[in-house]
Image: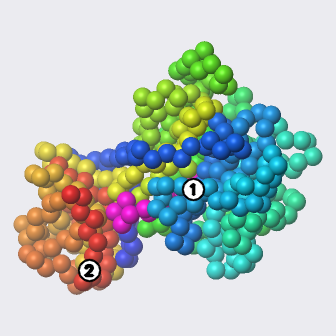
Amino acid sequence: MERRDIGSRLELFIDDWLIDRFDGATLRLHSLSKQPEQFAFDAPWEGPNSHYPAVLAVGPEYRLYYRGWRGRGHPAFTCVARSSDGVNWERLRLGHYEWQGSRDNNIVWDGEYAHTFAPFLDTNPASSDNERFKAMAAPRVAAPADIPRGLMRFGSPDGLRWHQVDQTPVITDGMFDSQNVAFWDAKRGHYAAYYRAFLRGDNKTGIRSVKTATSPDFVQWTEGRFLDFGDAPLEHLYTNATIPYSRAPHIYLAFPKRFVPHRQRFTAATFPGVALQRGVSDGVFMSSRDGLRWDRRFMEAFLRPGRDRENWTDRSNGFVWGVLHTRPDELSLYWVEHVHHPTSRLRRGTLRVDGFVSINAGYQGGEVLTRPLRFDGQELVLNYATSAVGSIRVEVHDADGHAIPGFTLDQCDDIYGDEIEGVVRWEGRSSVAQLSAAPVRLRLTLRDADVYSLQFRPIQTTRATGDAR
């Protein structure tokens, strides 16, 4: 059986890459906890068709970039807000562009490319100071014929003063009429782009899907390839929100907006004066370990429209690009609600750290056995949660499947509670350093419990437990 070399890196249980066998346990997709905070797109230069936000961590603060757009007949702008906590946002007063005779606004880019402007902070050490921030953007579908079609490059020294790098698009084999994202993948040493394209047809007959391309320098790009979803049913994916997960950057996560074009829950008569089209949307979750082949085992929604009627009209519930680590034990994700409505806004949801998917077993119990693992480290740490009666135990096997004396289930201290970094101990001992020389398997038994991630690491004298009490 193929061995998994994990070293000391964090591994998420988002798929069965680590798992050889399930017995009474399963992988469980978790739900976001919707928070009450909202950021309304209600400035005079914004409006009901504001969309395609991105959130970035920039030093001690967070940035929110988004398209401000009132709709057809009005110009679109790229706007920026900032936050010290990822919860409360304020518009920056930049004075860069004039709107209706005033420069008192938060506009950072004006013109055709504001329609899909998607910035990121470039962490490539070779990046120039003048392009510490980069962006890709495409014009709107109805742009004048002399506007080049494709993804154009932009740069900025500070994320606030932008310039168009060249006049020729660097990626042209897509549709591009929604958010198209790019970023520096430090783990693989290249830039990656994920962008809108139609699979087997056009915008009338095709399936909305996603292409990816890579580049060593953000200038020369490989030919785009459609994402491979294996045997999963094809669905319309309107945006993709693809990121390397910050705590485990060898893993890609994506949060596409799934579009169902033939459904219409409410007609225009329900919302007088609101320009609606057919279609409803929700948000889904998927993951990848190479950026091309994607695991879509979770076909159910990660984000449902809910009981809010304005979220059952077209193009709502699109995830923002970016996941923020807003507290030691908390991740924040964002999405757009009420698209086309006067109440169009940004909404925040939270998860525990690493909390997208878990190994789960109910009250009757279950277990998993991993593939052979090679690791570096001195102790095993689990991110887990149990009920008051729940428990977790870990047994270590050799490559032949025999329990290793000193690390059996009976010797494992009972694990219960709720910790982000819970150390596994056997009769009070946590050191597993003597086991790192040869492949081992882990047998985890669970009862009314979830395990979200694991990591082998050096023994630490202090740790953030992340207790949820």
Q: Nearer the viewer, residue 100 or 18?
A: 100
Place residue 273 in its image quadrant. Answer: top right
Observer-nearest of 368 and 203: 203
What residue is shown with label 1?
90
Query: How far apart are the alpha carbons under marks 1 and 2?
Result: 36 Å
Q: Position of residue 34 (x, y in %)?
A: 40, 44
Element type at mark 2: loop
Residue drawn at the location 85% of the way across and 41% of the way down: 143
Q: Name which residue type carries label 2.
A: Thr
Q: Secondary structure at mark 1?
A: strand
Q: Name the quarter where the N terminus is drawn.
A: bottom left
Q: Who's the residue at 17% across and 67% down the image?
A: 395
In this rendering, does residue 448 appear at all?
yes
Which part of the image, by quadrant, shows the C terminus? bottom left
- Note whether residue 366 is visible: no
Instruction: Give the amino acid at mark 1.
Output: Glu
Q: Which residues are magenta?
A: 321-330
Q: Is disc 1 in contact with disc 2, using a CB cutoff of under 8 Å?
A: no
Residue 325 belongs to magenta span: yes
Left or right: 55 as drawn, with respect to 440: right
